[in-house]
Amino acid sequence: MSTFEGTSKSMANQLSISQALREGLAEEMSRDPNVFCMGEDISIPGGWGGVFTVTLGLEEAYRDQLLDTPISELGYIGVAVGAAIMGMRPVVDVQYGDFLFLAMDQIVNQAAKMRYMSGGKTKVPIVIRAPVGATGRGAQHAQNLERFFVGVPGLKVVCPATAYDAKGLLKSAIRDDNPVMMFEHKLLYGSKGLGQATGAVDASSDIPEEDYTVPIGEGIVRRQGSDVTIIATLLMMHVAMNAAEELEAEGVKVEVIDPRSLSPFDWDLVEESVMKTTRVVIVEEGPKTGGWSAEIAASLGSKMSDYLSAPVVRIASPDIPVPFSPRMESYYRPNREDIKRAVLKLIE
Amino acid sequence: MTLKSTYSKAALLGFYRDMLLIRTLEERIGYLFLEGVISGTLHQSLGQEAVAVGVCSALNKDDVITSGHRPHGHAIAKGLDLTAFMMELFGKTGGCCGGKGGSMHVGDLSVGMIPSIAIVGANVPVGTGAGLTFKLKKEPRVAVCFTGDGGVAEGAFHEAVNIAAVWNLPVIYVIENNRYAASTHYSKNSKLEHLSDVAAAYGIPGVSIDGNDVLKVYETARDAVDRARNGGGPTILEAMTYRLIGHNRRDPCNYMPKAEREEAKANEPIKRFEDYLVSQDHISARDAEQMKLEIEALVEQSVQKAAGADDPLPEDALKDVYV
């Protein structure tokens, strides 16, 4: 898998997502003493630096800004919401995105609504980082949670697919005065040791030396093409890139858009692409019914009907929990062949 | 009255006046609701005034409280502007939450009250986060989480108190036990005789007191606040009181035994304190009457201001979702 950003070929600062996030957290904690991280097992001496090693090695230098919590997602996310209301900038590490359900009230009823309920007088600058994606751990350490938060007014939702975006979006999220949900894919972290994953995909990037951010709500064209637009995030973006490369050999020019943020969504970028290609495939890991891709498809269908030459196609997982067996899990996750088949059918 | 400390006359009359203000306000808005002037619903605190006033009197202005769906008394006791409060209940732009919050979300950070949280127990982690902030910033401030006998059955309560205990945070958890979680008696929510006994599970102090004795509430809260402010960590304070009205304004309270209600009325905090003040010559019956009239006028003034204030535009609903 190729990398996407950076002009230097020297690989001077080639970092994985977990390394880039670590750098970003360290820089933000140094820049602003109100920034702190909290979560389970994130800074235990002799421990893991979080399950995906994102905070590994920061525990001494940032002792006062790393809080190891009891196993209390509802409790500590609520505590983080309260701290954010009082002017802190907590970054919450949730071990697995699936655990967010334990804290839904604090996220959806409190963090998302507090600004509104107070008539704009309160703000909740919290970042909640959560790993997503099916990775051989069965049904409860595997879900893609993005779908549950894109329809919640007051929340922003970002999902970086590369190390460059991970660091840049993390910084934007920390500096944002709104609550931001940041979803990271377990197969993209590039974690070593405990967090190492079978089937991992290289999402590393050449990270600039200087401070930079990736604006929330700004997508990116990963690959230009004129026949079909594919919209995909996280792992699916990488799979879509592979599919696009193979389709290129068959003479099909695919444009791949990585929205990077699902809320707010970069409609301008997508609409511009649709005007050019007139055909859209959206790829989402997660059950098809009620997925975020349904919202994008419905909106494009109504807003862009004058431009579309075919209905928007959605590729997603079947409506089942994530199964354990590798054979069944592969069946669950949309793959390169699914995408190629859909694209070829669309241009028939 | 339990008197551990000596009080100035001004301090004693202050407690009395604050409780009267809450009572008068609650009674007035109750009528406004029945008249259809205030819409939605109201969860009122008549009979529970000593808890709000006793606890908030032990706090500094920059200390922070959080409350739940029954927040009126806490808000007024913490110093929320009366007119901003009233305008909020009227759904006016000038309300403390711009008319977007309503009765269950009143609050104002500038007076040390996080806008109220109407999911039972959910304010407990949030207030704990305020305590965490004070500890991280090494500020000598404390946070108070008001919850009820019902809130103690919520997971949020247990998780947050445990975190505060482990991290030794400056937080006081006030369980305002008004006997009924909506219509369910607290004996059906917990097997504990005293809800403050949960403190033992977290290794922190817990105490249950007569919550209709404003001075007892004040003194107990002050001890807990002093301890928290000086690094002594959290406390659970159960204040036994009684809701003299329904869960909300339409509730006829048929689940409350008549004898229990009669006893509660005889034990209600304001009359008790008034009798004490009169018996100790701190106030004459005539001066007490005069004070009531002044407070009624004050409340009426806020009602008139709210009634005459600008309504929001319908499309103002679209503002304030994001910063």
Image (cartoon, helix red, strand yellow):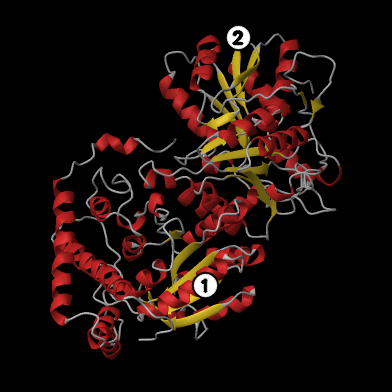
For this rendering, which residue is in front, A163 or A266? A163
Q: Quadrant of the N terminus of chain A?
A: top right
Neighbourhood count class around disc 1 (C-alpha, 10 Å): few under 14, some 14–19, many 20 upward: many
Q: Does B5 sit left or right of A106 as displayed?
A: left
Neighbourhood count class around disc 2 (C-alpha, 10 Å): few under 14, some 14–19, many 20 upward: some
Residue pictured at 49% horizontal, 48% vertical: A85
The disc labelled 2 sits on which kind of residue?
Ser
Residue B248 — which label?
A: none
Separation of disc 2 and disc 1 at Cα? Answer: 69 Å
Q: Does A335 sit left or right of B59 as displayed?
A: right
- Disc 2, SS: loop
Residue named by callout 1: B224
Mark 1 and mark 2 in contact (Cβ < 8 Å)?
no
The disc labelled 1 sits on which kind of residue?
Ala
Q: Is residue B291 above or below residue A294?
A: below
| Picture quadrant where residue A14 is located | top right
Q: What residue occupies the far bottom of the structure in this picture?
A: B259
Q: Is residue A236 above or below residue B54?
A: above
For this rendering, which residue is in front, B45 or B260? B45
For this rendering, which residue is in front, B314 or A224? B314
Residue named by callout 2: A226
Q: Is residue B160 above or below residue B280?
A: above
| Comparing labels 2 and 1, the label whose residue is closer to the camera | 1
Q: Does B82 sit left or right of A320 as displayed?
A: left
Q: Position of residue A324 (x, y in %)?
A: 75, 49
Q: Position of residue B71 (x, y in %)?
A: 35, 62
* Same chain letter for marks 2 and 1: no
Residue pictured at 41% horizontal, 23% vertical: A302
Parent chain of label 1: B
| Picture quadrant where residue B275 is located | bottom left
